[in-house]
Amino acid sequence: MHNASLSSFSVYTILSPLSFFIVITNNNTFTLAMASSTVYKCLTCNKQYKRKTAYNRHQQVVAEYNTIPSDCYILSVNATNEFKKTIVFMIKERLKLHFRSTGKQNITFPCSKSQFFAVFGGHIHHFNLKRQVYKCIFRGEAAYDSLAQLFDDRFWGTKFFDHDQRAFVLTYESQQIDVSFPLEDPDPLDIQDNKSQKRQKKLVQVVALWKVKQRSYAHYNSYSSGFISLSFTINRAWIV
Ligand SMILES: [Zn+2]
């Protein structure tokens, strides 16, 4: 269950003034000699470390975040699959062709901590103890397929329309931002300046957050519920 998370740490990016290597390691053992300016980069959160011990500590801390908390219960396979379908439904409801429906999206809906761990356990990368917020980040070339495996649905982030058109969740930065889609309305993507294009490109990722919303009222009474928030970027394209 935790293999997927740990595997993201098995790739080190080594940067130096003279060289750039991506080194795939086996059992966290380096296969190349390191330059003096070596940096250990976590490909999930982009944090960089000068020392391997600090990087390894980051690994350990993240692995601990994925330990199922004592206040969670194990969901049945059917219950988990049902919730996966709910997540996919909520995402696909946002997949539309109109330009106003593209770009950054955020959806929030009720989700118990047990449900969150049932689906995203092994992929949690941040945990805020004080606020009790868990966070998963999916980015890079393999992000779409990772989520397809998690949701058991390869079309989790794609919706097809008439006339060979599709809207989809953008998960990889090198994917082209569509600027030539024929539209009746002017497309604001055409008039974005370089600065906003860079900003959008930088934010291409899917983030899944779990948090508790708590409300207090008279006499110190309160009520609360767990919620999941998903943020992602929608693009559209011709089907090729
Ligand atoms: Zn990280």
Image (cartoon, rainbow, N blue to C red):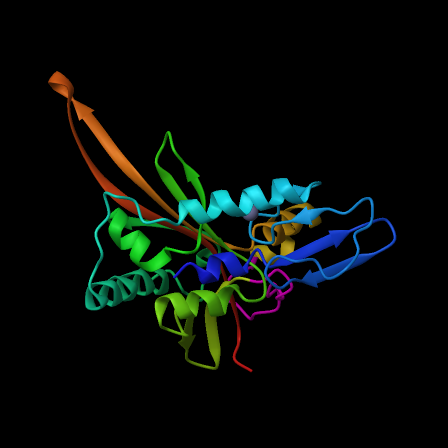
Given the current orientation, which residue lies at the most extreme top position? Answer: 219
Q: Residue at x 71, y 40 (%)?
A: 50
Is residue 110 visible to us here?
Answer: no
- Residue 208 in the image: state x and y as whole percent: 41, 51
Where are the magenta residues, as a range? 172-187
- Residue 223 in the image: state x and y as whole percent: 16, 32
Q: Is residue 158 left or right of residue 38?
A: left
Front-lying residue, 9 or 240: 9
The image quadrant that residue 36 belongs to is top right
Front-lying residue, 148 or 229: 148
Front-lying residue, 167 or 18: 18
| Quadrant housing the C terminus | bottom right
Tally of marks = 0
Front-lying residue, 150 or 68: 68
- Residue 142 in the image: state x and y as whole percent: 54, 67
Residue 182 painted magenta = yes
The image quadrant that residue 210 belongs to is top left
| Quadrant housing the N terminus | bottom left
